[in-house]
Image (tube, rainbow, N blue to C red):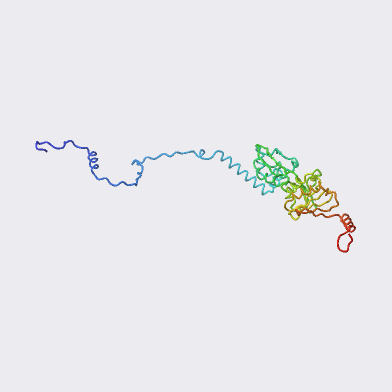
Amino acid sequence: MDGGGRYLQPMTAYRADAAVARAAAFEPRRPSSSRFTFLKPFRSSRGVRRRSAVVPLERRLPRFLGTGLALGFFGAVIFTGLLQGGHLDDFVRTHGEPHHALARAVGLGLDQVTISGITQVRENEVLAAGGLHDKLSLAFIDVNEVRERLERVPMIKTAAVRKLYPNELVITLTEREPHAIWQNKGELFVVASDGTVIDLMQDESLVNLPLVVGEGANLRNKDYMALLQAAGPLKDRIRAGMLVSGRRWNLKMDNGMDVRLPELGAADAVARLVKLEREQKILEKDVLAIDLRMPDRIVVRLTEEAASARAESLKKKPMRGKGVDT
């Protein structure tokens, strides 16, 4: 109390929780911590039982599971019976593989094959090369395998295969064009521009194709074509190109004359031949071979008759020198 009998603080009583809060305000603060405590959920002391959601068994199983299992069981039984009884081979011969037969039964058979881009290959050859027949089903055909099998055929350059459901297979082919005839070891082959052997020479309509002779000449037939173009007016008089040692060409002319070309600069040598024919009619002379391998000279080989005639003319010709009258 003060000197007048009064209290210095009010006499009102504080609530217990307020007093605690005021006391806590004056207490020193403890350092904070990064640890958190997760309280367990409160449980009633009366032990109330939690309800669990009960899903019926038929709702937890996939639809049509029973039907699928039944069909699988009967299918396994039938397959085992066919296998043990020796009837599976007969079934495959008659109806094809079981998976193909099943696919055909549901409407996915191979009923139509459309082939485009062929002029020299026949349809039955394409089907046989692709392994296609009526016991297959469109669903289980591997188009990549069919394409690879078709491209192994020498006449076929590229193949594209696609499915058109429910039952059509479309095949688009690019054929190799006959580019030249290759003679090797006494046999004639038709080859493409890249040297691929297409077939044996059996078609008389291809006899006018350029002829290359010798081992590896089929792979260099483009080089020979370039020489034919360089020959210009003499192109039709060249019957064949013979590859010598895989390095250079000899030209066989229509009169049997051989023209030997160098390994380098063969086109320039052919141009020299054209000039010789234009100025001296070299191809009309009694010459067996013309050697153009040296750029600064021409070597000719005469026939036996021409060589004998030349030798006789040289004997009759007066010669200058010691002991000879001039």
x and y, in percent, of residue 81 in the image: 66, 47
Q: Nearer the viewer, residue 223 or 146?
A: 223
x and y, in percent, of residue 75 in the image: 63, 44
x and y, in percent, of residue 244 in the image: 76, 54
Q: Nearer the viewer, residue 222 or 44?
A: 222
In this rendering, the answer to whether 69 lies above or below 303 is above
**Quadrant of the frame with the N terminus:** top left
Q: Residue furthest bottom?
A: 323
Q: Residue furthest front?
A: 326
x and y, in percent, of residue 183 in the image: 78, 51
Q: Nearer the viewer, residue 78 or 148?
A: 148
Quadrant of the rendered image containing residue 294: bottom right
In this rendering, the answer to whether 82 lies above or below 314 is above
Task: Judge left or right: residue 275 versus residue 36.
Answer: right
**Quadrant of the frame with the C terminus:** bottom right
Marks counted in the figure total 0
